[in-house]
Image (cartoon, rainbow, N blue to C red):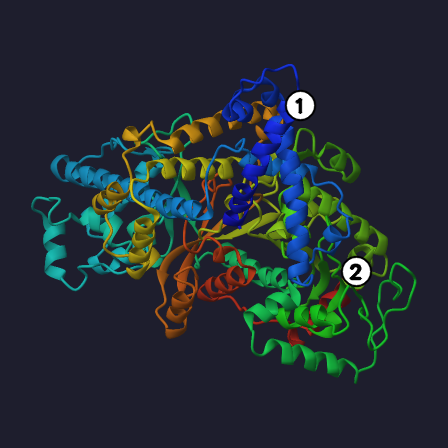
């Protein structure tokens, strides 16, 4: 998707340049001795108007692209509103794209350049992580040597990275202490730090010699290097390092070996970051399967992630099961004709025009709106979730600009009424995603009774939630189910869930409904990174839990991170000293060495390889054509940022209590290996994960990874979260059993007595 947008920018740069020259040439106040470069960048008349011109160009490109994409896919992914002209204003979309891509027609790039930039940026990011991990290992070695010689505690000097506070020092010290005291045996190192395999665990004499005494040298590597580099194999590029709790004693470690803490390596603030201090390390908690609250949190996340998956309906169901899905859905449709029609329970079976829509061949059925004549959406929803026909209360599958499909179901197993909101799937949704300008929440807060003073959110999320609330208020289904006199499920709890854009909508909807349903909770799956201002994103931690899978791109997306990614790619393109074919060969070679799980890398070898491909940062040629183009582009971007500073300086974050599923290992099965071969190592199938509670600021850098796209797919997040829940001992069976329904009826009877 990013390469596609860059391609659109490249295709339009010549048109933008010609229109700029034509525009300025029509003004007689300026002389005719202007060069093309003057017209593009330095001319005072163009300097005043080129921003509006760029927005006009992107408006035209977006309209043409959306019409072409909708027609070429036979409206399979929506777009009819875009073709019919229902969406008349692309203003905010064109401004957002111009903010990011406006180059005055001077930046000469093609898609293969962007691909080369991503390849090299991935190598640079990996080198930075390896450098920091080695520095942490060296600090541990220093403390280990100091403790052995002085038998006392001393703070560690950190000269190449920055820890967030002294707690991180205690974690490192704790790891050393347990090794010195002999409370962690050589076989237990991997269990205490991170699941993995020691390279020398079959050589007990070697480890005993290293632990018992003698000098520690770099060759062979000291035990502390093994602890933080070899033990973490086969994941040398992870930004998460796991340690024993700093406050854990020997008994606690023995009884609960999985209770650990972690260091999260996140990009340092701009004012503190330089070439030697790129990351800062912050202490984070690893969720423990022996902790009842943690087990419940993971089980709840897995359960409602399945609900968020179900609303994606037949398109994703077909993607997940391309062979058997359509025969099954058609069978479900035929079987409906043999069953009595179910009347809706909470509103009249009429569409907005008043026509009855419940005939055998109608598009809608019972309490569903916007389905096709085969009822593919509805039947796929039931197949995804495993629920019974009577558990579906209402489903609105209509997908328009600023209107997201959603459904309301009853989950008897978890005694809850669930609202599931779909994420991005159609062309209309893609336009909503690009509505990144923050919009104030003061008016919405006054209307629904929450504090929105000085708070902002993604304007696309706000527009979708306003449309969804109108539909909820029109039908009053939640009141009929939960709160009215004679409500059908007054003893059940309200749960909101969604994936991607739907997760952001569910969070804002939670703020709105919480006044009426104070015990509601929101389970947000992979929400956008640029969603809410800091106060709004963090004050909801008591009722919003967010789950993110490893290097997922979307929770890291914000205006700031996208600009940082763009600037880094352009910077690395200016440093490449070989042709693009050699860059591609380096990528293929790296992929053949198991891609993201390459065992043999260390900072020095990777730095040497990168030096063969890139100029050193301080020795970039300044007389090249691209360097001059880049300087002109940066000048245009500085000017544009200044004109929109008030909007672009508002920082937005992902919401709620953040749980990050961190990659810790790999399952080696035939199917998983086949998936990696077919997808050129971009599939995340076969990896193993552990849940770590992180901070809302931790996703402040886009991680260039082969799995950065697949980590966002709702089916992958759901399946991996269910696997983690199973490892925590949770029941992840789909649907509700008869026993669950009986327990629900018992609760309802008991609540009626009181």
Asked if residue 596 is positioned above or below residue 607 in the image, the reply reads below
Task: Assess disc 2: are there few (<14), some (14-19) or many (≥20) residues with their C-alpha within 10 Å of its C-alpha.
Answer: many
Question: Can residue 422 be spotted in the picture?
Answer: no
Q: As rendered, which of 281 and 352 lies closer to the eye? A: 352
Question: Which residue is at 36% across, 63% downward?
Answer: 666
Question: Can residue 131 be spotted in the picture?
Answer: yes
Q: As rendered, which of 754 and 238 lies closer to the eye? A: 238
Q: Earlier in the sequence, mark 2 or mark 1?
A: 1
Asked if residue 306 is positioned above or below residue 466 in the image, the reply reads below
The local secondary structure at tag 2 comes to helix
Q: Count the marks.
A: 2
Q: In this view, does 657 lie to the left or right of 124?
A: right
| Badge nearest the viewer, 2 or 1 | 1
The image quadrant that residue 446 belongs to is top right
Asked if residue 335 is positioned above or below residue 511 in the image, the reply reads below
Could you tell me residue 15's position as x and y percent? Answer: 59, 38
Looking at the rendering, in which quadrant would you find the C terminus?
bottom right
Could you tell me residue 386's position as x and y percent? Answer: 63, 72
Q: Among all residues in the image, which is located at the extreme front?
A: 32
Could you tell me residue 527's position as x and y percent? Answer: 58, 48
Res. 481 mark: 2
Q: Which residue has dot 1 on it?
A: 26
Question: Which residue is at 92% across, 62% downward?
Answer: 354
Could you tell me residue 399's position as x and y percent? Answer: 73, 56
């Amino acid at each position: 998707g990013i390469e596609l947008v860059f391609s659109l920018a490249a295709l339009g740069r010549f048109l933008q340049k010609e229109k700029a020259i034509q525009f300025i040439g029509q003004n007689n106040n300026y002389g005719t001795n202007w060069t093309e470069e003057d017209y593009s960048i330095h001319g005072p008349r163009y300097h005043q108007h080129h921003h509006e011109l760029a927005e006009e160009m992107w408006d035209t490109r977006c309209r043409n692209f959306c019409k072409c994409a909708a027609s070429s896919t036979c409206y399979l992914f929506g777009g009819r509103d875009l073709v019919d002209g229902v969406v008349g204003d692309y203003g905010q979309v064109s401004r957002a794209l111009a903010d990011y891509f406006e180059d005055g027609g001077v930046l000469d790039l093609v898609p293969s350049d962007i691909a080369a930039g991503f390849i090299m940026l991935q190598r640079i990011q990996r080198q930075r992580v390896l450098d920091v991990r080695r520095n942490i290992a060296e600090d541990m070695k220093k403390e280990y040597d100091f403790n052995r010689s002085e038998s006392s505690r001393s703070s560690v000097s950190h000269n190449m990275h920055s820890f967030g506070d002294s707690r991180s020092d205690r974690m490192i010290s704790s790891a050393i202490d347990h090794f010195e005291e002999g409370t962690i045996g050589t076989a237990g190192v991997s269990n205490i730090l991170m699941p993995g395999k020691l390279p020398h665990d079959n050589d007990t004499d070697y480890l005993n010699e290293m632990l018992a005494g003698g000098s520690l040298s770099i060759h062979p590597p000291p035990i502390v290097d093994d602890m933080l580099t070899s033990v973490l194999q086969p994941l040398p590029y992870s930004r998460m390092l796991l340690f024993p709790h700093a406050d854990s004693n020997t008994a606690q470690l023995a009884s609960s070996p999985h209770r650990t803490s972690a260091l999260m390596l996140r990009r340092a603030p701009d004012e503190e970051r330089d070439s030697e201090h790129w990351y800062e390390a912050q202490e984070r908690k690893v969720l423990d399967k022996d902790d009842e609250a943690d087990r419940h949190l993971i089980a709840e996340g897995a359960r409602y992630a399945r609900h968020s998956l179900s609303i994606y309906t037949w398109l994703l169901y077909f993607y997940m099961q391309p062979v058997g899905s359509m025969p099954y859905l058609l069978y479900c449709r035929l079987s409906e004709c043999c069953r009595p029609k179910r009347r809706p329970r909470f509103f009249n079976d009429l569409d907005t025009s008043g026509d009855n829509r419940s005939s055998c061949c109608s598009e809608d059925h019972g309490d569903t709106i916007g389905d096709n004549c085969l009822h593919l959406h509805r039947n796929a929803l039931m197949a995804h979730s495993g629920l019974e026909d009577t558990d579906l209360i209402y489903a609105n599958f209509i997908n328009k600009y600023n209107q997201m499909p959603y459904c309301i179901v009853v989950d008897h197993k978890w005694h809850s009424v669930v609202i599931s909101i779909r994420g991005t799937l159609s062309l209309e949704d893609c336009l909503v995603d690009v509505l990144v300008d923050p919009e104030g929440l003061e008016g919405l807060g006054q209307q629904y009774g929450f504090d929105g003073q000085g708070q902002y959110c993604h304007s696309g999320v706000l527009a979708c939630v306003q449309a969804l609330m109108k539909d909820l208020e029109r039908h009053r289904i939640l009141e009929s189910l939960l709160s009215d006199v004679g409500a059908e499920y007054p003893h059940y709890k309200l749960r909101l869930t969604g994936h991607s854009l739907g997760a952001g909508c569910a969070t804002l909807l939670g703020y709105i409904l919480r006044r009426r349903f104070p015990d509601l909770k929101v389970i947000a799956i992979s929400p956008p990174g640029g969603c809410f201002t800091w106060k709004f994103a963090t004050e909801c931690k008591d009722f919003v839990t967010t789950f993110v899978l490893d290097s997922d791109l979307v929770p890291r997306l914000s205006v700031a991170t996208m600009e940082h990614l763009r600037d880094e790619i352009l910077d690395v393109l200016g440093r490449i000293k070989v042709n693009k074919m050699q860059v591609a060969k380096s990528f293929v070679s790296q992929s053949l060495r198991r891609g993201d799980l390459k065992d043999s890398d260390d900072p020095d070898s990777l730095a040497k390889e990168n030096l063969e491909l890139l100029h050193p940062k301080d020795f970039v040629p300044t007389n090249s054509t691209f360097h001059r183009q880049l300087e002109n582009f940066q000048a245009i971007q500085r000017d544009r940022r200044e004109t929109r500073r008030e909007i672009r300086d508002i920082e937005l974050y992902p919401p709620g209590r953040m749980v990050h599923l961190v990659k810790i290992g790999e399952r080696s099965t035939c199917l998983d290996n086949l998936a990696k071969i077919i997808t050129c190592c971009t599939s995340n199938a076969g990896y193993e994960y552990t849940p770590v509670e992180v901070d809302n600021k931790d996703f402040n850098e886009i991680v260039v990874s082969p799995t950065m796209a697949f980590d966002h797919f709702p089916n992958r997040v759901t399946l991996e979260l269910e696997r983690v829940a199973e490892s925590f001992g949770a029941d992840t069976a789909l649907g509700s059993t008869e026993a669950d329904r009986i327990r629900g009826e018992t609760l309802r009877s008991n609540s009626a007595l009181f």
